[in-house]
Image: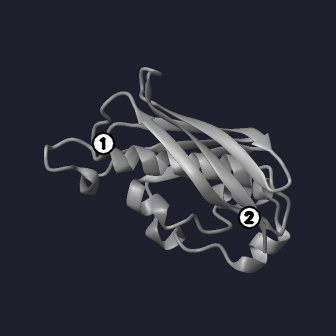
Amino acid sequence: MHTIDTNLLAPIPIDHLRTLSGVELFKRVIAGDLPAPQVCGVANEWMLEIEEGRALWEASPPANFVNPMGGVHGGWAMTVLDTALGCAVHSVLPAGTGYTTMEVKTNLTRAPKVGERYLCEGKILTAGRRTATAEAKLFDAQDRIVAFGTTTCLILEF
């Protein structure tokens, strides 16, 4: 599991969003040349791989996501899924193009545990001129699906 350096968490400067494709942008984030989004520190997640149409994340529920019953709040898995979904969409976009979520749907199938390591893979389903869709799955160490989701995103120009 990666250790998150909070010094590497910040908004990506708009100039980079205007000049780098989604894949180029995320390759620079993985290399440490650009900051990762602040949500990475909150949800304890880190991008491992990026290619056009696919994003792979590693994540581990932090203690600040424990609910009143002592389990991991469902919002943690939903956050990690949303990150992988959005990055899968962004990975197919050219420079100067971004997106915003129009709809997201998640299903939780197993209870994640604090401190356990999970992988989350997002994949593009469709990418049109104005909208894109993606799916993501969150896997535990035994390769079982813990949660899955889909999204529809509106494609925007900067």
Which type of secondary structure does the marked residue at label 1 adopt? loop
Q: Are marks 1 and 2 in contact (CB under 8 Å)?
A: no
**Dot label at residue 128:** none
- Estimate the x, y position of residue 133 in percent, counting from the top left: 69, 44
Residue behind mark 1: 115
Residue at the (28%, 47%) spot, across then down? 73
Q: Is 93 drawn above or below residue 116 in the view shown? A: below
Can you say which quadrant of the picture contains the C terminus? bottom right
Residue at the (43%, 62%) spot, across then down? 41
- Estimate the x, y position of residue 121 in percent, counting from the top left: 59, 37
Q: Is residue 45 left or right of residue 53?
A: left
**Of 11 and 74, the residue lying toward us:** 74
Q: Residues within 10 Å of mark 1 (few under 14, many from 20)?
A: few
Instruction: Mark yes or no: residue 2 visible.
Output: no
Q: CA distance from mark 1 to mark 2?
A: 33 Å
- Estimate the x, y position of residue 79 in percent, counting from the top left: 45, 51
The numbered mark, 1 or 2, whose residue comes first in the sequence reads 2
Inspect the image, locate mark 2, and give the three-letter code of the amino acid beneath it.
Answer: Gly
**Which quadrant holds residue 35?**
bottom right
Q: Is 41 drawn above or below residue 113 in the view shown? A: below
Residue behind mark 2: 98
Residue at the (58%, 46%) spot, across then down? 84
Q: Is 76 drawn above or below residue 25 in the view shown? A: above
Q: Residues within 10 Å of mark 2 (few under 14, many from 20)?
A: many
* Image colouring: one colour
Q: Is residue 53 left or right of residue 30?
A: right
Residue at the (55%, 74%) spot, across then down? 10
Instruction: Mark yes or no: residue 66 visible.
Output: yes
Inspect the image, locate mark 1, and give the three-letter code of the amino acid beneath it.
Answer: Gly
